[in-house]
Amino acid sequence: MRGPHNIIRLIRTGATLVRTGAMNVVLDAFDAPAPLRMVAYTLGWPFQWLGYKGDPAMPPAPRALTALGPAYIKFGQVLSTRPDVVGEDMALQLRVLQDKLPPFAKERAMAEVEKELGRPVSEIFSEFSEPIAAASIAQVHHAKVADTGQDVAVKVLRPGIERAFRKDVDAFYFAARIVDICAPGARRLRPMDVIEHFDGVVRGELDLRLESAAASEFADNTAKDAGFKLPPVKWDLSARRVMTLGWADGLPIGDNAALDAAGHDRRALGERVLSLFLNHALRDGFFHADMHQGNMKVAADGDIIAYDFGIMGHIDLYTRRVYAEILYGFIKRDYQRVAEVHFEAGYVPAHQDVDEFARALRAVGEPIFGMDATHISMGRLLNYLFEVTERFGMETRTELILLQRTMVVVEGVARSLDPRINIWDVAKPVVEDYIKSSIGPRAIAADLGKTAMVLARFGPRLPGLVERALIAQAGEPEADQGHRPWKRAAALGVVAGIVTTLLATHML
């Protein structure tokens, strides 16, 4: 479908960008080269009368994307998590995109529920409300389960949304290909990678079974977290296009007046939001990546309730350990160690100077630590850190960009509850606990134990692997060994690794 017929969609897109005043803003955000600007204006300026007007009260970029429809709104939301691609200013603009659209009729939602669950709505729910929230992909209804009387939230995908998104995403791919062909200098913007990232996010959100699974996994991970709970997934009332959760009953976490009237300690709530997020990111490697005020409530007993699990962040165990050491190094103001961690992890090319990098990190950290404690921002620190590492040749890591973006949002929520919160005072014990549990002797023993389990599964094959490695090393011609020392090192490394692991396992 990524053929020339997509030119019509691109013309309408360009015309809308020009008409809303967003064209220059967008091109400047991407630092687009002259050939790309010429193509963009050729597709937009002569046809601006075809463009949508949008809401004049909104900033140009959100105005254009909102006017163009659901796929463009979602694209803007995804780009708001990628300041490495669009820049900080544009990312900030896109974060204020109101993901609200006119709802579709209640009757159509009920028809979708009946189709997905295979039963009449009247048999499933004794009550089914008008839509209470409508977003780019789905809308939510308040309902009551007929059998139990339980209050639930029913999320239903918009009818035909999959086909509509597919058409727009095909146009996005087509546009990215044009950029690659017409403006080779713009390839550093990685247009195809950006669209592939967006495509993956949307595919996940268009199958509510995946969001249900994310909610279920998140609930399992956080079951023992004091003062935090999630609405349970009703698996028997969920399917690909319908997701049913228990109803989250509480006060909006952004309504300070209501929280005060109910007697809640806003400072304690703000500190808990921060510590919960850090625990989820470091301890579990699976965190809610959209923790703004609209996705959290405060229950009558003071518990924080989170919902809407369409965007979740993943960090592997190794990256978590590296991230924790970096944070801990900054907390201790040990810039040399922070620099060494970057080199050890391979984040910064080995040919760079570690001492020079440490001095650059000091230039990042010291001004921040010179601030009043209530103004210190971990999100700002990470942002400055990424700027420095980019100068030293570090490649962008998408998972850390999402983490940094979420950290900024969470800090904003915490400080809206109490501006006097000291971010480092909250972060330090969380990071220290993680360091002790993941990098100390007990963690090493646990890692060796896991390695032993893997070796045990491959036990019958280990003698053959060792024998082949030794034969290959011994039989290699001397001249070839001189030209390829890495082969000998690799073979010996295999043997040494196996022997060392087995000895360590035996000692355990």
Image: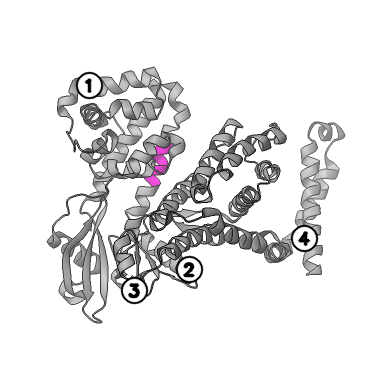
Instruction: Tell me the distance, in whole angstroms, between the alpha carbons under discs 3 and 1.
Output: 55 Å
- Along the viewing direction, whichever of 373 and 328 lies nearer the viewer: 373
In the image, which residues are magenta? 194-200
Q: Residue at x 68, y 59 (%)?
A: 439
Which label sits on residue 45? 1
- Along the viewing direction, whichever of 339 and 36 lies nearer the viewer: 339
Residue matched to label 2: 222
Instruction: Tell me the distance, in whole angstroms, between the alpha carbons under discs 1 and 2.
Output: 52 Å
Residue matched to label 4: 501
Q: Nearer the viewer, mark 3 or mark 2?
A: 3
Asked whether disc 3 touches disc 1, contact meaning CB atoms under 8 Å apart, the reply is no
Image quadrant occupied by the N terminus: top left
**Mark 3 element type:** loop
Mark closer to the chain start, 1 or 2: 1
Q: Residue 449, position in %: x, y?
A: 70, 66
Residue 399 magenta-drawn? Answer: no
Instruction: Tell me the distance, in whole angstroms, between the alpha carbons under discs 1 and 4.
Output: 66 Å
Q: Residue at x 32, y 18 (%)?
A: 38
Residue matched to label 3: 300
**Mark 2 element type:** loop
Q: Residue 152, position in %: x, y?
A: 27, 71
Q: What residue type is disc 1 on?
A: Trp
Q: Residue at x 29, y 35 (%)?
A: 61
Mark closer to the chain start, 1 or 4: 1
**Structural crowding at the residue carrying mark 4, measured as other residues with C-alpha within 10 Å and reported as few (<14), some (14–19) or many (≥20):** some
Image quadrant occupied by the C terminus: bottom right
Q: Is residue 475 above or below residue 127?
A: above
- Along the viewing direction, whichever of 385 and 346 lies nearer the viewer: 385
Q: What residue type is disc 4 on?
A: Thr
